[in-house]
Image (cartoon, grey):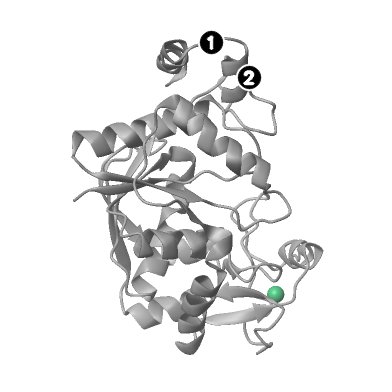
Amino acid sequence: MLISRFAPSPTGLLHLGHAYSAFLTQNLVENNSGSLLLRIEDIDKTRCTSDFEKQIYRDLKWLGIHWNDTPIRQSDRLSCYSYYLKKLAKKGLTYGCDCTRSDIKRALSAPNTPRKNSNTTVYPGTCREKNLSLDNQNIRLNIVKSIAYLKKNTLNFCEEGTGPNGESGTQVVSLDSLAKNYGDFIIARRDINTSYHLSVTVDDACQKITHVSRGNDLFYITPMHILLQKLLDFNTPKYVHHPLITDGHGHKLSKSKGSESILNFRESGKDLETIKSMLVCNSN
Ligand SMILES: [Zn+2]
């Protein structure tokens, strides 16, 4: 059975972009007699509030989104992420990093550091050989060791939607380019002992998600998730990336830019059909 999920973060009010994503995911599920699960991605406690979470349920109900089972909340699952983090640590694939942002910036601006371009923020591996304790540190995934562990040069995933540049079908991920483009990324932040990448990968596996439906702004980080799935012996789901809803100027809608919320639309008397027609006009 097809199982997909809608996974909002309660850091603000849902806007048209969320509604679009939720409708597409619900359509995917309904067209395949599947199941839609809801996940509240609230690991960042400094930005998430329970009021926004409650509003998510109200907005989704008003939008006619139906989910199966009780929603899961990432903040309730920290021990589960910690379990899988330890698994990676036991395989010798992680290390502690005590670099500050400015340490990393300084290391990257050193004259002998090879850089693809001036915007590159790939971690230079400063702490890789330091053997720092994993307690109370940011924890990074050692990509070179991970590649050696997998004994592979490439990973694959199936794109059933489209990436930002029209990518679809089987996507081949070169592990060398993953190392070059992402470096040893953080899989557990010191303050929450997990990360977006680790939590999402673990939750998709635990919720037995077969199809990950989400905006194509996440397409290019998918290789990080595929890598974590392989290292943790999880199945790789299919991916169905969709275009983002944009404002009149081609910019992505976001909470921080004050994009009009579903709540505002509703309170100003707009009905569901009006919302749906706006989505058709704004999708590209
Ligand atoms: Zn470091």
- Residue 151 vs 107, above or below: the answer is below
Q: Which mark is residue 244?
A: none
Residue type (three-letter) at the residue carrying disc 1: Lys
Q: Position of residue 183 (x, y in %)?
A: 55, 66
The residue under the point 42% across, 16% down is: 276
Quadrant location, the C terminus? top left
- Residue 174 is at least partly visible in this image: no
Q: How crowded is mark 2: few (under 14 residues within 10 Å), some or many (20 or more)?
A: some
Q: Is mark 2 on a helix, strand or loop?
A: helix
State the residue position of label 2. 264
* Residue depicted at x 53% and y 33%: 58
Q: How far apart are marks 1 and 2 (CA)?
A: 9 Å
Q: Does label 1 point to a residue whose CB lies under 8 Å from ligand 1?
A: no
The kind of secondary structure element at disc 1 is loop
Mark nearer the N terminus (1 vs 2): 2
- Give the labeled residue for mark 1: 270
Q: How crowded is mark 1: few (under 14 residues within 10 Å), some or many (20 or more)?
A: few
x and y percent of residue 221 in the render?
A: 47, 53
Q: Is residue 191 visible?
A: yes
- Residue at x-position 65% and y-position 90%: 131
Name the amino acid type tagged 2. Answer: Asn
Q: Position of residue 269 (x, y in %)?
A: 57, 9
- Ligand 1 shows up in the quarter that is bottom right
